Image (spheres, rainbow, N blue to C red):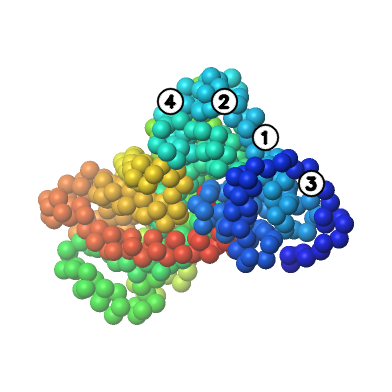
Amino acid sequence: MSKSNDRSPSATRVHHCYELTTEEEERIGNLFRQLDANNDGRIDVHDLSEGLKKLNIPQLPGSAEYFIKKADANASNDLSLAEFVNYVQEHEKRLLLVFHTLDANSDGRVDESELISSFSRLGVHITKDEANKLLRRMDKDGTLDISFDEWRDYLLFHPSANLHDIIMYWRHATNLDVGEDLSVPDDFSLEEWLSGKWWRHLVAGGVAGMVSRTCTAPLDRLKVFLQVHGLSQFRGLGECFSYMLKEGGVRSLWRGNGINVLKIAPESAIKFAAYEQVKTILLASTGKEREISIYERFVAGSFAGGISQTAIYPLEVLKTRLALRKTGQYKSIADAALKIYKTEGVKSFYRGYLPNLLGIIPYAGIDLAVYETLKKNYIQNHSGDMNPSVFVITACGAFSSSCGQVASYPLALVRTRLQAQVIAPGVSHNHPITMGGLFRHIISTEGVTGLYRGITPNFMKVAPAVSISYVVYEKCRQALGVTMT
């Protein structure tokens, strides 16, 4: 609906405003003008959303719409200065009442101990570390306590003054798929759960993953070839790439990508469901409402990764076989699955399962630890900004994922060779096909560096995967009407 210029009696009905001081009038007036993007004297949802971004004020998904709806006295879908002032005054009064409940010693500032004590009275347990982090989100002057002005400025556009809702507003963190499987799924706020917008984040991330994997599929296939064949067939990246082009043409560079894209949906769904279930169990064990710790996230992420990998592992085997197939070997994914089953049996679909499962633990631990460390350092070095941009989060995720891959890569390489053992020359006939036997074979014939064959194209695809995933995610979430907070 377009902005209304209606100035009928209903549009100008009396607002129960209190007398403003000159200073307050100037502050709220300046804020209104900053949010009024096209200077027409009205603020709509788009103006408010874009204005809050420019002012670096955090938003929950749907909060701009909610703010307009609550403040819009004449149902015009936009706000006049009078409507804006009226709502801001009323909301600030509610925020002031909540602030006074936190300010136990009535000194006009809320510190760490007062925050912990106030939350405890509400039945919410938070640690000193978490209280410190929460304070830093609002603390502009570096005093590690907050004044009402800091409290008000941070929460002015939050749709509720209820303390429980504010806690959920504080407790929000998100990870983004950067083309590889992240070990720890997203955490969503209560507002996102209740509004149903959590699934839109997952859809946007899934689409971004599909596009980025498709664009970097040639590098992924190159990695698989080098992992399986090592130096026995190719002397380097160029020779391997030339072979793939010569054997199957340009289209062959995307072999195995179809199933790599198809498995994103079931893998993400199972991992997310398992992560939430394990997280619930861990939090319920203490009997207190609190934020999950980094160690518990690691445990929950590892369990979730293990469960999802167990469920979709046959698709991983199929992906490897299809990536390595020769022209005309299989007609389709279904044909490949049927031929593998007939010639090798059901067990073939779980070859390499053990090293794959073992690789989850170092990958999850290092990925999460590096991610949290990078994010923490960014926040500390950027004036306590507790809401890094999507690009910052993506960059942290990409680097942490790469570190995790370095630690778990030997296990990933052994897994891939076990998956492709009937194809890999010099392994299936001369050595026992076991994880330990394969490790010994690689080290004895290729040295320790043999355990890292194919890691170069793996690193080469990180930058484009991050860039593509970031752009696609941004476009998708905008189309789906969700905000990254």
Badge 4 or badge 3: first in the primary sequence: 3
| Quarter the N terminus occupies | bottom right
Residue drawn where x is 53% and y is 64% of the image:
475
The residue at which mark 1 appears reads as 94
- Residue sitting farthest toward the right: 9
Disc 3 marks a residue whose amino acid type is: His
Give the SS element for disc 2: helix
Badge 2 or badge 1: first in the primary sequence: 1
In space, the residues marked 4 and 3 are separated at their CA atoms by: 43 Å
All told, the count of numbered labels is 4
In space, the residues marked 4 and 2 are separated at their CA atoms by: 16 Å
Disc 2 marks a residue whose amino acid type is: Leu
Where residue 48 sits, quadrant-wise, is: bottom right
- Residue sitting farthest toward the front: 22
Disc 1 marks a residue whose amino acid type is: Arg
Neighbour tally class for label 1: few under 14, some 14-19, many 20 plus, Cα within 10 Å: some
Give residue 3's position: percent from left, percent from top. Answer: 73, 65
The residue at which mark 2 appears reads as 102
Give the SS element for disc 4: helix
Neighbour tally class for label 2: few under 14, some 14-19, many 20 plus, Cα within 10 Å: many
Image position of 208 with respect to 152: above or below: below
Q: Nearer the viewer, mark 2 or mark 3?
A: 3
Image position of 395 with respect to 380: above or below: below
The residue at which mark 4 appears reads as 128
Apparent side of residue 447 relative to residue 85 in the rendered image (left or right): left
The residue at which mark 3 appears reads as 15
Badge 4 or badge 1: first in the primary sequence: 1
Give residue 127's position: percent from left, percent from top. Answer: 45, 25
Taking depth in this image into account, of 451 and 353 the one nearest to the observer is 451
Residue drawn where x is 41% and y is 69% of the image:
215
Q: Is residue 364 visible?
A: no
